[in-house]
Amino acid sequence: MTIETSPEAELEPARQQSLGTAAARNLATTTKSAPQMQEITSRWLLRMLPWVEAKGGTYRVNRRLSYTVTDGYIAFVQDGPDVRVIPQELGELALLRGFEDVDVLTAIADRCVRRDFRAGEVLVERGAPAEGINLIVHGRIRQTSVGQYGDEVGVGVLADGHHFGERFLVGADATWDSTATAETAGTLLTLSRADFDAVLSRAPSLRAHIAQAGSLPRQRQNRYGEAEIGMSAGHKGEARLPGAFVDYELHPREYELSVAQTILRVHTRVADLYNGPMDQTEEQLRLTVEALRERQEHELINNREFGLLHNADFKQRIQPHSGPPTPDDLDELLCRRRGTKLFLAHPRTIAAIGREFNARGIYPGHVDLDGQLVRAWRDVPILPCDKIPISKESTSSILAMRIGEDNQGVIGLRQTGLPDEYEPGLSVRRTGINEQAIISYLVTAYYSAAILVPNALGVLENVQISRWGD
């Protein structure tokens, strides 16, 4: 039997036969998450640093007296196509260290000549006459020499702010003991021995400085530049023993606790009426503290006063041999200190490390860290930190550190027992209610970091992270 329907009946909408979900939700209790925040990271640096109490807000690092002054980077100023060395920066050269006659330093700086070079260009050749010093404005330069068996051996890699050939400014008939080849295009400033001699002949203060530096008795030092402690070993009979004492730095460095602060505002109506099922003030405070801790880790890496990148000793900064981070580069970084506990790198840098390892058929292991498996090299964990900057040229840095006060390593500084302390080294103070019925909370974190001895921290600089294999 067939039932026929009219066209009008087909056009009528179907009648709802039960309660819809949109209306039903008005009577239902929704299940909701706590407020989420994309800015939160693993913050491995804050987790791994041993935190030391800094009573009085200051931590003094006493060290054994050192007689060597680390060569720092030489800075330049650029004005359009012209570039020149800042005269006072020439004091970074051992020959001119402590020399403060600005007029003479300016005369030397004016005689520096710019030289642009291209990738692959041989800048100086081993055995050729050495006639001056080269200051690297920009670029990477590899130094090579000849090994015991006639093969080529690497001497070092230099980059922005470094220099080579300083000892050839004085004396004659010197020859280069290594070949310098440009790995990238760049710029040098060169100062010839003839130009230096011309300034020297007209500057009595410079002649006196160099003569005094050559006549001063050299303090005996160990290989770290510290004043040597005299002792005798292997002697027989009643040998006269040398006297000794351990001298200290007269002006040790002091680290003052830095501060990060913000004011959290919550309306009383929100705090009073909308606290179920979650406490609005607590959730606001939780996310504020997370943001404050993120800023704290950023400062520990990048702050110019105490940040690890800016305070690493210049002798502990090395350059990669070919650009990307290879196993050889990580080994070079490891061998410069005892007891390295961790590498710290940007996640993109860690990805570049993985590519280079895979290209060589090397598969690094993993270590268990707080119940989490993390990639490791030589059983040293490689931990991510997105606070390490990446340059416009897609280069970054890798940090390696020994940690702990007992190990003469890197430590974090804070002070606990603060008034209204919310977490160690972090306080939350209610500051009152204004005329708009808004409650204010002052959220404060005090922190810093200290490098107890120079070789506690090393940096692999200018790591190329955007190179991909074929």
Image (cartoon, helix red, strand yellow):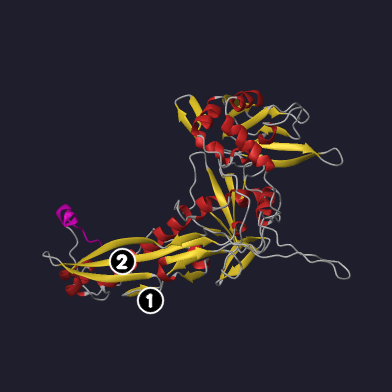
Q: Decide: is 248 above or below 205.
A: below
Of residue 274 and residue 12, the one placed in the foreground of this image is 274
Left or right: where 466 falls relative to 293: right
- Give the label on residue 417, or none: 1
Report if residue 74 is visible in the image: no
Q: Secondary structure at mark 2?
A: strand
Q: Position of residue 358 (x, y in %)?
A: 66, 51
Asked which secondary structure carries label 1, the reply is loop
Q: Quadrant of the rendered structure where residue 455 is?
A: bottom right
Q: In 3D space, how far apart are the residues under numbered discs 2 and 1 (Cα atoms)?
A: 15 Å
The crowding category of the residue bearing disc 2, from other C-alpha atoms within 10 Å (few below 14, some 14 to 19, many at least 20), is many
Asked if the magenta segment contains residue 49, the reply would be no
Q: Position of residue 241 (x, y in %)?
A: 79, 66
The amino acid beneath tag 2 is Val
| Residue span colored magenta | 1-12
Residue 267 coordinates in the image, percent (x, y): 18, 67
